[in-house]
Amino acid sequence: MPQKTNLNVSPYYDDFDKGDNFYRVLFKPGHPVQARELTGLQSALQNQIESFGSHIFKEGSMVIPGGVTCDNAFTTVKVNPDHLGIDITVYLDAIVGGNNGKGIKVKGQNSGIVGTLKGYLLPPEEGVEEITLFVKYRDGASDGESIEFEDGEVLILEENVTYGNTTLNAGDTVLTTFSVDATSTGYAVGVSQGVYFIRGVFVDVATSQIILDPYNNEPSYRVGFDILEEIVNSDDDPRLNDNAKGFTNYAAPGADRLKISVRLSKKQLSDFDDTNFVELVKVDQGVIKKLQNKSEYSVIKDYFAKRTFEESGNYAVDPFKVDVVNSLNNETGNGGLYREGQKTEQGNVPSDDLMCVRVSAGTAYVKGFDVDLVGSTIVDVEKPRSTKKVDGALVPFSMGSLLKVNNVFGVPYLNIGAPVGSGSNVISLYNRRRNTSTTNAGTGLKIGEARVYWYGVSDAPYSGATTEWDLYLYDIQTYTTLYLGKEYSTSDVPLTSFVRGLSSGATGYLASKPNDAAFSISQTSELS
């Protein structure tokens, strides 16, 4: 994106137009040099830099890594505006900016906690009503438990501080914390020194920090750079006057300068006027949704993506987890994400006709491009509400548990839905194969019973004993065999008797008696 300041105005008249294909300004002896020619010369060179830079980097991309940091444990403390009758703003800059800008350490008189003052806000900055200091705690309290300054506590200097002609010595009291709710945890976003590609030029960015909320660590903001373009003349900056003789000649003002600078700023999530804004971080209720902390390449990235996709295809490095939930929370346990009156992440009104597809954080390569989600993403999807009536259709259906059997003898009795007494479709289950005789009697120990739902050849016509049959069973009742310390006959304990464990509470029915000292029990249940 080129610069937005129009320089084709008085007194510069920079009429460079890249459509003219003028790539050099050719000065000639005997001809005076025009100011617009010198300005146009710079514009031609700048156009070349912008064309190359746009091929490599996207607008707003970090070039020389500086890094973006999000601090959701940004500790603050509110203090009284005066101490011992002295306005603390007189020496507040000296305390915060002392120790070569690293901040001065102070100690709580009661708690014994030591912290370094890193900055401050004065009312009405950022909506604060009291003077608010930014503190990095270093040493814990003397009680071994407290971790922050107390309400109404006096703060003592740990180092000497000089402001003007006055010196405050270590041990002097300088601040008093607010009497109620003095300490809080806020949220801050900072950038380190680096270079960014903005407006076709490589802009130096200094280390800076912005406070999203000094008293709440769950704010919702878009954070990024506000881009400032301004023309600076010698009235604004005396250094632009002629200094050919080693001093600033105010009678000989020099050329003006076009200055491009950036500053960290925050915007509401619903504010999408990005004409002079480059987004770096998006925070929604304290959760990071976007974090631009690496270089974003432009056209050259398409080449690398094409090669990556041809070589490796699509793949996930850190797989995403996807779940589907209701949009509107009905307050009765439907698990909806949003309550009535709220807005969804995409700005829609939650309703029963919407569902939310939630995608967790993860990393993947899609078509060769890296997709890196630092936080969960929620997409609104309309629930399917259209219906179609089909009067008749075949629906594949399988009932019961399937057993593949062969070497069969006889046919089980189905008789599903028949009245009682007309026959039974109950079959017995044994723990051994049947014998080789042509009898249908089971062998081994009877281990249960089941009912037959369907029986037929699997997928080929019958050809012999090796033919597989599909046997669908339901109401399967397997036996539990109990071995007793004493022998009981069926006259003592008749079959079908209901029994219960005295200690366990488990119940069941006597189904068979495999030997004199054992009973097989069906329909067992355990006491929960």
Image: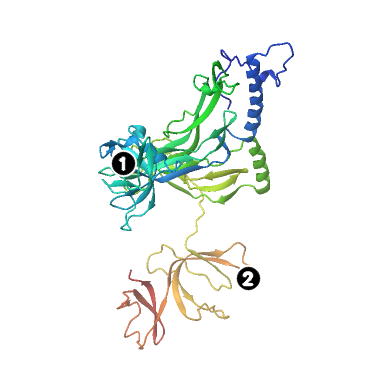
Instruction: Please identify the quadrant where the C terminus is shown.
Output: bottom left
Q: Position of residue 324 (x, y in %)?
A: 45, 47
Label 2 Cα crowd, 10 Å radius (few <14 / some 14-19 / many 20+): few
Question: Which quadrant: the N terminus?
Answer: top right
Taking the image as shown, residue 367 lies to the left or right of residue 519, namely right
Residue sitting at x 51%, y 80%: 443
Residue 167 at x, y percent in the picture: 36, 40
Q: How many marks?
A: 2
Point out residue 105 in the picture as x, y percentages from the top left corner: 38, 47
- The residue that mark 1 highlights is 78
At 66% from the left edge and 45% from the top edge, which residue is drawn? 308
Query: Which image quadrant for residue 66?
Result: top right
Q: Residues within 10 Å of mark 1 (few under 14, many from 20)?
A: many
Residue under the point 72% across and 16% down? 27
Per the image, the residue denoted by label 2 is 464
Q: Is residue 384 visible?
A: no
Nearer-N-terminus badge (1/2): 1
The coloring applied to the image is rainbow
Residue closer to the observer: 447 or 123? 123
Identify which residue, 392 or 172, lies in the foreground: 172
Q: Is residue 215 left or right of residue 17?
A: left
Q: Examine the rendered structure and indicate whether residue 238 appears above or below residue 178.
A: above
Q: Secondary structure at mark 2?
A: loop
What is the spatial separation of the Cα atoms under label 1 and label 2, in whole angstroms?
Answer: 92 Å
Residue at 49% x, 69% y is 412
> What amino acid is at disc 1?
Lys
